[in-house]
Structure formats: structure tokens, C-alpha cells
Image (cartoon, rainbow, N blue to C red):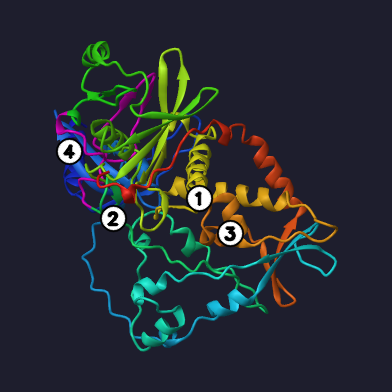
């Protein structure tokens, strides 16, 4: 019997030696009590052995990377081990006739069409529906920037005839949902022309700044390096890698001052730091306060150390960004909650001082303890309130994270529906509103407005014009959603004057 047990141990050790980086096998996922066991397929990213204890770092296939974790051998189903396959060269695709075809609906056709808004009890339009005309704007063509100055999408298609199309979407290389423009462009109708499409494809993200879009698949950055952080009264498990100093990656808890965001390696160091730290709120100017909610504007050049620490903290919960230490071109807007101890950070967003693409948000985050409380929409609403003060429309930098994409879609939907639902007839006639007027009222970019209407399936084609059909069910759903938004931005409480950074010699 003793020999049999010893042989089993030797056999298990031999099998575990075969489990190397790149292998795939079912792994028991961490679950809550009273839940059924799950054994999803996972990929081995790394392995380590410390003090005779062997552990494997796994990524669960088809699950978000925030669930990646270190597991012990008893959670591996080694009998179903799959070894990594050799990379096979992908055969090149031949040119298809589709590459030479023209768009099904030219932009000039969309510009000439009128859109009518209908509000009814049913989802299908009928002649008796109350309608509101919504004319589509003439859409500028960012595609001209890709194909040359002053070139229209049609002329660009002609000039590229016979050439193989090259994809410019970077989202296909990462585990995030596709950009909203791409995922919402499949709305169609059998007998009608295609619904209006946002003319601007997702632009290639910039690769400079404090936090830029990341597509790096380096194995080091795929492994979480911080086990736990303590921020104020919360202990938080990070989701992703962040380039904190190597000496902090070997300890169980990283302690962070919630006011200046300085990181230390022990509670004693944190207590000693608190006796010296004079901050009780983020550095910078308080530009908004209502009840216990405040917003502080922080210049990345004037408060460089705080901005860098904020980016390090944010990277723990953002996978689609790469951190850089050049914070000079950025402004950071930190949202806080006030109590007798001070102003506690809830979330933040950053924006470029000068954005060539008119982005009003570069990076946005609500810290995990404050999520699902309406603070994400509050951050988004505040960013658009700043755009209203600047007198222009804005849009978040793409690609968005999975949670960011959901938050923005929800905000756009509620904001646009709020305008459509509250439209009232004038002089007994059906009220009219254009896409441009919606953009002026909300500061949402028109491509985002059109894509949101498509996402909500509100656009239909009826008797030669586009109509927006608002069913009673859609209105009731909107009213229930708005009733849950207890916290809103009050423009009267915002004390801020936009600066023209282009006229300044230095940021």
C-alpha cells in the first residue's frame, strides 16, 4: 500500500512537470459558497515554486482577464491536459469581389433623407402614429483623413478598387468588446435602405500620454503582480498588472494613502506618512461641490507626482491602457466623497489639454468599492457638462474597456431618450428636432448619437423617410431607469472656466 501511494505521488509529480506555459486544461474556478463547481478550460501562463509549494497562474478561456489567478495543483484536471500547438502559417486570402463593391447606401443618400420620430403603443410604425421629423446631418468624412485630404468615401472606394482592404480596427487583437461603431453597424432592413451609419470609423488610438491604449501581450504584463491594496478603509483585490516597484510585488498588502496616493509597504510606514501628509483632499482646484460630492481639477504638469500615482492606481483596474509617466499634457478630474476625515477618492477621468480628435475623456475609472452606485454615470455626465461649458461636442477615447463601453452606452441611451420623451408639440404641430440639435443639447458627438439610436433599434424606414419609433414599453423602461439615477450633475454648482491651451506657450 505504501509503495502504491509513493508511485502515485511520483506519477502526479511527473504529470505536473509536463504542465508548462501554453498548456490548456480544465481548472476548478474559485466559487462562492453554495454554488456548483465549475471547471472551465484555462491556459497556463506561468508557474512558480516557493518553499516547496507549486502554483500555476491560469487564464480562464472566454472569461475576463480580471479572473486570472494563481491556483494549486489540486485544482487542475491534469488527465485532460492539452499541449500547446505549433503556430501554423495562416494562408493569405485572395482578393474578393466584395473589396471592389461600392457601399450599399452612399453618404449622399443619407444626407438627403429625413428621419421621423414616432411615439406609439406598438413597436411597428403605422400611418396613424404621432411622428416627429428628425433630419440627419451632413456627416463629415474622417475617412478622408485616411485616404488623403478632401477625398470623399466614394472617391476613396474608387481609388482603392482592386486593392486588398486592410483592417484598421485594433480591437480584434484584444479580449475587449469591439468598438461600439463596429458592433452597432449590423442593423438592416429587408425592403429599406440601410439605416444611417456613423461615418467615423474607430481611429487608431494615440500611443503617447499618461495612459495610452495597450495591445501588448507581454507575458509579464498579463500576470497580476499586486495581491492586495489598502486604500482608506477598503482592502481591494487588483484586477490587472500595474508597474509598481518590484519590491512591492513580493508583499501581501500594498498600503496607499487615500489623499496623496503615496504607496508604502507596511502599515507602520503608512502611519508614519500620515503624520507628515497635510493633504485632506486631492491637490488642485475644487470646481464642483453638491452635498458630499466634489470634483477637483488637477494639472498633470503642476501635480506630477500625484498624477503618476493616480495612473499607477488606475492601471490595477484597467487592462486596455499602458501607463506612461508623461502626465504634462493631461488634466485629471477626481471625484470625491466628503466626511469629517476628508475628501475620499471615488473615481476619476482624465482628458487631454489639446485633443486633435475632440476627445473629452482619455481614461475613466470608478474604484471597485464605489461601483454599481451610479458614480460611473456621474463621471460621464460631468465630462459632458465640461464639454457644454466649452461649447463643443465630445466623445471618449477608443477603445473603451468592457465596463466603460456598457456605462457609456447606458448614459447615451438615457440622455437621448430623455430628450425625445420630453419633446412637446408646438402650435398643434408635431415637434421637430435634428441630430445636430440633439448634439448641441447633450454635447454628444453625432456618430455616438446615431449609433445609440441603432443600438436601441429605434430607427426604422417608412414611406421614404427614416422614423424613430418610441413604444410605450421603451418609454416605461426609460422612466424606470431614470428613477434609479438618484445623483445628477447640477450645472449651477460647477464653477469652472475653460482654458484655451493652444494659446499658451507651455502646458
Residue 233 lies in quadrant: top left
Left or right, 70 with respect to 474, comes to left
Check residue 219 for magenta coloring.
yes
Kindly report the distance in space between the C-alpha atoms of the residues bearing marks 1 and 2.
34 Å
Q: Residue at x 20, y 25 (%)?
A: 251
Under tag 3, what secondary structure? helix
Q: Give the label, 4 or 3, closer to the camera.
A: 3
**Which numbered disc, 4 or 1, marks the residue that appears first in the sequence?**
4
Give the label, 4 or 1, closer to the camera: 1
Q: Secondary structure at mark 2?
A: loop
Disc 4 packing (10 Å; few <14; some 14–19; many ≥20) = few
Q: Quadrant of the N terminus?
A: top left
- Between marks 1 and 3 in the image, the one whose residue lies nearer the viewer: 1
Look at the numbered disc 1 and give the secondary structure of its residue. Answer: loop
Q: Is residue 494 left or right of residue 239?
A: right
Q: Which residue is mark 1?
A: 391
- Check disc 3 and report the residue beneath it: 455
Residue at point 30%, 42% (across, down): 76
Amino acid at each position: 500500500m505504501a509503495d502504491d501511494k509513493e508511485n502515485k505521488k511520483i506519477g502526479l509529480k511527473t504529470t505536473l512537470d509536463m504542465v508548462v506555459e501554453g498548456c490548456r486544461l480544465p481548472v476548478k474556478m474559485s466559487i462562492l459558497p453554495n454554488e456548483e463547481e465549475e471547471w472551465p478550460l484555462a491556459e497556463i501562463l506561468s508557474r512558480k515554486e516557493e518553499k516547496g509549494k507549486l502554483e500555476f497562474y491560469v487564464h480562464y478561456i472566454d472569461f475576463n482577464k480580471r479572473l486570472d489567478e494563481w491556483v494549486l495543483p489540486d485544482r487542475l484536471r491534469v488527465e485532460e491536459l492539452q499541449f500547446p500547438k505549433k503556430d501554423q502559417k495562416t494562408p493569405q486570402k485572395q482578393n474578393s469581389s466584395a473589396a471592389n463593391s461600392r457601399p450599399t447606401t452612399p453618404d449622399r443618400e443619407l444626407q438627403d433623407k429625413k428621419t421621423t420620430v414616432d411615439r406609439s403603443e406598438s413597436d411597428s410604425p403605422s400611418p396613424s402614429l404621432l411622428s416627429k421629423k428628425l433630419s440627419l446631418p451632413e456627416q463629415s468624412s474622417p475617412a478622408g483623413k485616411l485616404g488623403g485630404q478632401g477625398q470623399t468615401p466614394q472617391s476613396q472606394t474608387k481609388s482603392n478598387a482592386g486593392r486588398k482592404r486592410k483592417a484598421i480596427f485594433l480591437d480584434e487583437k484584444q479580449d475587449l468588446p469591439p468598438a461600439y461603431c463596429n458592433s452597432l453597424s449590423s442593423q438592416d432592413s429587408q425592403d429599406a435602405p440601410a439605416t444611417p451609419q456613423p461615418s467615423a470609423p474607430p481611429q487608431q488610438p494615440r500611443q503617447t500620454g499618461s495612459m495610452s491604449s495597450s495591445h501588448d501581450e507581454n507575458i509579464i504584463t498579463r500576470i497580476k503582480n499586486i495581491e492586495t491594496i489598502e486604500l482608506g478603509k477598503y482592502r481591494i483585490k487588483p484586477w490587472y498588472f500595474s508597474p509598481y516597484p518590484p519590491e512591492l510585488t513580493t508583499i501581501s498588502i500594498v498600503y496607499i494613502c487615500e489623499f496623496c496616493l503615496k504607496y508604502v509597504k507596511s502599515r507602520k510606514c503608512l502611519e508614519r506618512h500620515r503624520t507628515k501628509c497635510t493633504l485632506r483632499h486631492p491637490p488642485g482646484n475644487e470646481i464642483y461641490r453638491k452635498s458630499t460630492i466634489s470634483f477637483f481639477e488637477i494639472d498633470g504638469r503642476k501635480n506630477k507626482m500625484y498624477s503618476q500615482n493616480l495612473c499607477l492606481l488606475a492601471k490595477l483596474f484597467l487592462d486596455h491602457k499602458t501607463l506612461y509617466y508623461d502626465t504634462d499634457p493631461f488634466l485629471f478630474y477626481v471625484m470625491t466623497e466628503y466626511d469629517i476625515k476628508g475628501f475620499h477618492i471615488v473615481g476619476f477621468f482624465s482628458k487631454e489639454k489639446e485633443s486633435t480628435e475632440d476627445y473629452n475623456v482619455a481614461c475613466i475609472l470608478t474604484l471597485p468599492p464605489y461601483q454599481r452606485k451610479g458614480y460611473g454615470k456621474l463621471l460621464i455626465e460631468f465630462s459632458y457638462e465640461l464639454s457644454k461649458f466649452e461649447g463643443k461636442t465630445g466623445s471618449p477615447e477608443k477603445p473603451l474597456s468592457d465596463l466603460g463601453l456598457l456605462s457609456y452606452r447606458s448614459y447615451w441611451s438615457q440622455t437621448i431618450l430623455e430628450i425625445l420623451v420630453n419633446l412637446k408639440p408646438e402650435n398643434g404641430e408635431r415637434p421637430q428636432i435634428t441630430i445636430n440639435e440633439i448634439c448641441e443639447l447633450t454635447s454628444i458627438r453625432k456618430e455616438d448619437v446615431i449609433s445609440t439610436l441603432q443600438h436601441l433599434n429605434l430607427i426604422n424606414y417608412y414611406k421614404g423617410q427614416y422614423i424613430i419609433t418610441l413604444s410605450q414599453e421603451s418609454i416605461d423602461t426609460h422612466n424606470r431607469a431614470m428613477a434609479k439615477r438618484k445623483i445628477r450633475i447640477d450645472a449651477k454648482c460647477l464653477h469652472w472656466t475653460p482654458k484655451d491651451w493652444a494659446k499658451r506657450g507651455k502646458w
